[in-house]
Image: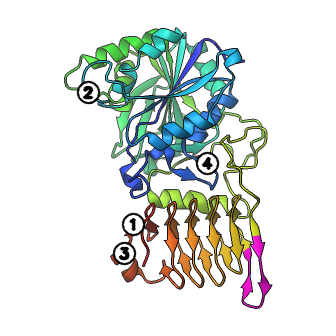
Amino acid sequence: MADPRVLGIVLAGGEGKRLWPLTADRAKPAVPFGGAYRLVDFVLSNLVNGGYRRLCVLTQYKSHSLDRHITTTWRMSTLTGDYVTPVPAQQRMGPRWFAGSADAIYQSLNLVYDERPTHVVVFGADHVYRMDPRQMVEQHIESGAGVTVAGLRVPRKEARDFGVIDTALDGRRISGFLEKPADPPGLPDSPDESYASMGNYVFTTEAMLDVLRADAGEEGSVHDMGRDVIPRLVAESAAEVYDFGDNVVPGATDRDRGYWRDVGTLDAYWDAHQDLVSVHPVFNLYNRRWPILTSQPPLPPAKFVHDEPGRTGSAIESMVSPGCVVSGSSVRRSVLSPNVFVHSGALVENSVIMHGVDIGRGAVIRNAIIDKNVSVPAGAQIGVDPVADRERFHVSPGGIVVVGKGQVVE
């Protein structure tokens, strides 16, 4: 049964500019991932698996597909009062949209007043990971802190790309919260590592209400959780860190324990998929004790047809979703989302192919991300000629070719 003391708020209003063109027509948390999922499914699965089933997902930017996915997929039992509901910007505080992540919660405080929780879990919606949130909530309650921030240990030289948590000598109390510092502080027990903020917080309700009201009245604030709200609580000595490395997820192995990926860039998104299709992926989608939940469309199983010289339907080191047909073609180190058709003689390598893509005869696709409902004509080549690719498509800094949703390929 859901814990009646805890309300979950998921921040899902991000625009995701660095994932363009995948975010040209959808919010970042609605971006498909791993063939069957959307990014928002990971945080919601963690919260629901952990027993927190009264969840409000705050949305704003191009939220239609995200709102629809949440409404149609995440249906909880009404018998126990559980729910997962999208909450779009409603301009409750006047004729303005959310000005930042803190302002999104401030404008939605009616949710807290209605539910009257003792604690509020505030998680982001953009990351790929497994986490049992109960362990973080338990530490928070025992500590008596106003807020607990989830921290991920990363090498100091990499920490400058994150919001960094500086701790006191006890390793728990947060003494500083730094936004992408040039010289990140080391940890008391590991000087060569720093805590990167995961954007996951547990608040005592009273402390959250007080700090959000104070931030709302601060003219110089950008009303962001990491930049404004958490530093305010740090200054009051009311913030502690939760070491994500201590989190134990049922069914996890030593290899995938502590896995967390920010797939906020095209290259990071592609890299995460390449891990999924590897022989021994770091992130294990097949953990049945802590499943990643989503809706599965009523589609037939994937089919592989033809076994002739030069015309054999096959997929090696790949993930192939329901409704796909691999007809006399070859798929290698790739993810095929539902309803993809790969025609005879085509080759797909090192690529992410989204829903409803049709790949014509003899086409070659390498190192690419192809968004939904794209028709690749027979003989077309994507990811073969870098000069031609840059003239027709968006190409990431790492050389990944990205074809936008419904884009015409000639």
- Mark closest to the chain's N terminus, 3 or 1: 3
Task: Kindly state the secondary structure of the residue where label 1 is placed.
Answer: loop
Label 3 packing within 10 angstroms: few (<14), some (14-19), many (20+): some
Question: Residue tagged by mark 1?
Answer: 397
Question: Residue tagged by mark 2?
Answer: 96
Marks 2 and 4, Cα distance to the nearest angstrom? 32 Å
Q: Is residue 323 above or below residue 58?
A: below
Q: Nearer the viewer, mark 3 or mark 1?
A: 3
Specify start and end residues of the magenta stretch as a single range.
Answer: 304-314
Marks 3 and 1, Cα distance to the nearest angstrom? 16 Å
Question: Residue tagged by mark 4?
Answer: 37
Overall secondary structure of the magenta section: strand
- Mark 3 touching mark 2, by CB under 8 A? no
Task: Kindly state the secondary structure of the residue where label 3 is placed.
Answer: helix
Label 1 packing within 10 angstroms: few (<14), some (14-19), many (20+): few
Amino acid at circle 3? Arg
Q: Residue 309: which disc?
A: none
Amino acid at circle 4? Tyr
- Mark closest to the chain's N terminus, 1 or 4: 4
- Mark closest to the chain's N terminus, 3 or 2: 2
- Mark closest to the chain's N terminus, 2 or 1: 2
